[in-house]
Amino acid sequence: EQPSGSQGLRSKQEDAGRGVDNINRVVQANENTDEDGTIAYNKQNATRTNSWCEGSIPPKLREEYQQLWQEIDSITQHYTSTTGTKISGGLFLYPRQAALLGKLIQDLMIHKNDVLQNQAKTAFRICETGFGAGHSAAFFLSLSAQVQIVTFDKFDRPYQIPVVKQLEKAFPGHITHILGNSCRTVPNFFAPKNGMAQHSNDDCADREFDLLHGSSLCPTDNIDLVQHATCGTILTSTAMHALSDRAVYFGPNAQWRKLRDDGCISDITCFREVPRTLNQSFIFAEKDKVIAHDFCFAVVTGACSNNNCTIASDNEEKCVEKREAMKGILNNLCPDDRIAVPS
């Protein structure tokens, strides 16, 4: 049985097609906010201030992904109310990260289209570990018809496959889900097939991504993504309670610390969400807890890549050129609102 609110997802591909034009139109003004400084979606969890540097997501696109999130909520609530299963959280809790991701993807797409001389239907490919309830996948897909996403998760929560199916109907051919423990499925996905020592050209094309989003419980998912990424790919990860956390960012033996120390990523750029009080319980935190999580972006250097692909972006000269371009894009991402990266 499907909740009635999920039906609206089925017509979103046409809206995303219009997003191609919107995403290339730079909006100079801040996002529209309510008079009290909040955005329309989930005000209890998404409070933000007007004074903060906001991303330039066109209002129409913002309305579209917020509508998708509301429809996803109707699906998750249908299953959580009958099974008692909690959701893990999601991008909807982090409006600053969503705003910056929207701005970043806009800039990355403009750059990619310029480099490829605006070839029609150029795909912008995203690799994500940790589908959760699908909020980030829905957000990415709503930005443009150019977006394609491969998402890894165990998909063992009762609401996850229904959300995937609805996104597949809304964005046919634009989302691929890989079921299983991402500690195993990510390396398997990138490994050469049929016992070959190296990927075919088609396989390489299918495994090259523009943005990596590490958001699973696998303790090596960011490392696995970076080791199989090409030079100049952008990495971001789920927001955490602090950049000193021991799992993802810069605590002892955390993934981003290892990647930085090994020269696998550079140009690390970090931000903090505005504090908020949760209005419901999640897997990571209980109702009424105040959270103020941190998140980062970085450029993959290519120094740690073992993806067995020989493609143009692996050429050293092109690699340096692309890394410099990505550095420039990150440098323009709200420079006055960054937080210090732990040493």
Image (cartoon, rainbow, N blue to C red):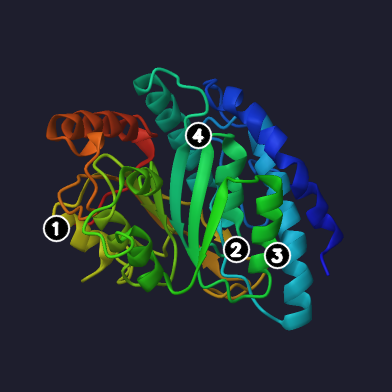
Q: Earlier in the sequence, mark 1 or mark 4?
A: 4
Could you say whether the residue bearing mark 4 is in a helix, strand or loop? loop
Q: Which residue is mark 1?
A: 261
Judge by depth and name the residue closer to the eye, 325 or 206. 206
Q: Is residue 299 visible?
A: yes
Marks 1, 4: nearer the viewer: 1
Residue 272: % across, % down: 42, 51
Amino acid type of the residue that numbered disc 3 sits on in the rendered structure? Pro
Residue 198: % across, % down: 23, 54
Marks 2, 4: nearer the viewer: 4
Q: Marks 1/4: CA distance?
A: 30 Å
Q: Marks 2/4: CA distance?
A: 23 Å
Could you say whether the residue bearing mark 1 is in a helix, strand or loop? helix
Query: Where, by quadrant of the figure, is residue 15 drawn?
Result: top right
Q: Dot 4, crowdedness within 10 Å: few (<14), some or many (≥20)?
A: many
Q: Which mark is residue 55?
A: 4
Q: Is residue 42 visible?
A: no
Q: Which residue is mark 3?
A: 162
| Residue at the image position 55 percent from the left and 47 percent from the top | 95
